Amino acid sequence: MSRGGLRAALGHGVVAFALLFLFGEILALLRAAGPLDPTAGGVLRAGALAPSFVHGVPVDVRLLDVSGPGGLFGGAFEVGFTVRVALLLGTAGAGWLLFRGARAAGGPREGLLVAVPYTLFSVGAALLARGSDPAILLGAGFAGLGETEAVPSPWWSLALPATLAVVCGVAGGLSATDGGRLRAAAAGAWRMTWMIVAGGTAGVLVVVALHPDATRAFLDALGARGWAGGAAVLLVTVLLLPNVAIGAGVAAMGIPIVLRAGDSTCALIALRGTPCGELAVDVSPAHFLFVLVPVAATVGGGWWAARGLERTTAAGAAAVGAGAGALFAPVLVAVSLMASVAYRLTGSVAGALGEGSVTVGPRPMAVLLWALPWGIAGGTIGALAAHGRGTGPGGGPGPNVSRGAALRGRRRRGHPSRLALLEPQVGAVRHHQAQDQPDERSPLDGGKLRQEGDDREQRGRPGQGGADEGG
């Protein structure tokens, strides 16, 4: 591995974590600008919680009410809750930087190096955040309750950042290698996933625009918090937008979004099942337009997968498109798990009331069973459509390879890509030029060339022309 590739991998891992940590500190400063007035050390430790909330690490928030009979629970009771949420826009940004670093490293094995600094710094941030004041991030309502602390799970603080970095490292390294069926299928599955998120986001924004009263009420609530508190809530809302978009895209595939509270389950978004009362979304005919999101995502991913092949038959293109759809299903399961939100009550009060948990999101098995036929069918259709439009020449790039893909493939193999693409044209020009040149071995062309040479030599003699005229 070259030194440049090593620096790129390690550097991108450091930068990806640094941006997450910086985001956490900015958010903590905005939340602390109110009546809390915490110390600089308290703000630093609270901001270190950001990587945990980006990776979906479970965070225990423990409260000890020692305020006496007039306190929150009427005495010294310990209560707490565990919350798990991933701010997916931040997760996507970190993953993109890790992917780019692994791609610059040059291969899947080299790309794994991005996980080293990223994981180590993430674990360090979790240790720094251990025992931080949750009131800084959760609001002034948690202040004055006695001893409070936030504790990220040590095991998940190691496992989740490492998994994200390893997956992005392998994917980025694979993208830097020569094209192949596996790489094309993986690229197609990735496009299906992010197109689900992009399409769901666009649909959610359209729905927001169609409900101006609710939007105005939300903005008024932000203004009531002051500029710092409102900015902090708005920032978190934007980072959670992909979570909502994934829910919308998954629901459009026919997968219910359910709320599970203990042993009870109800549907928040579904065409069937027990609705969650007033919390459930009323599905109107206009909402069925959301089905265009998974259709476009799966067909577009299959198209992209087939365009990554150099030359193949229709059956080969269909196989790659179906493979992209098969890979898309487990990827969507993982992304849906990260997009879900979980809450669990703990502590002595929870023991008296009965420990309860609440989870919002689709069931993983339902996502897998629905995403497989969606991905395989859409991927096959998109791949066959891409193959049918291919017009590549016999000796050049295949019918399913775009000019950009051909350039990237030649660049990865170390060839002068642009010159390589121009070689047929250059050869044709040289061939025509050679046909236009006279053949000196021919008696006619040879005599003509000698006569032209004599004329040029005669004209080049000084004074020769005037002497001839005077004679």
Image (tube, rainbow, N blue to C red):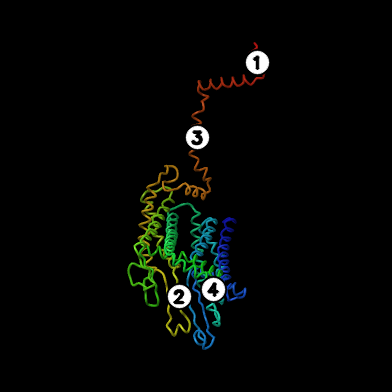
Which label was assigned to residue 291? none
Q: Comparing marks 3 and 1, which lies closer to the viewer? A: 1
* Residue 64 seen from this side: yes
Looking at the rendered structure, the kind of residue marked 3 is: Val
- Marks 3 and 1, how far apart at CA: 43 Å
Relative height, residue 195 to residue 141 (above, below): above
Q: Which residue is mark 1?
A: 466
Mark 1 or 4, closer to the camera: 4
Q: Residues within 10 Å of mark 3 (few under 14, many from 20)?
A: few
Estimate the x, y position of residue 426 in percent, counting from the top left: 50, 37
Q: State which tag comes first along the sequence, 2 or 1.
A: 2
Residue 441 at what x, y percent from top left?
51, 24
Q: Circle 4: is it few (<14), some (14-19), or many (20+) Cα within 10 Å?
A: many
Q: Reading the chain from its start, which is encountered first: label 1 or label 4?
A: 4
- Separation of disc 1 and disc 4 at Cα? 101 Å
What type is the residue that disc 1 sits on?
Answer: Gly
**Residue nearest the observer in this picture, 5 or 213:** 213
Q: Which residue is mark 3?
A: 429
Residue 6's spot in the image, x, y percent? 58, 58
Distance (Cα) linking label 4 and label 2 = 16 Å
Farthest bottom residue in view: 69
Q: Is disc 4 placed on a helix, strand or loop?
A: helix
Question: Pointer 4: what residue?
Answer: 137
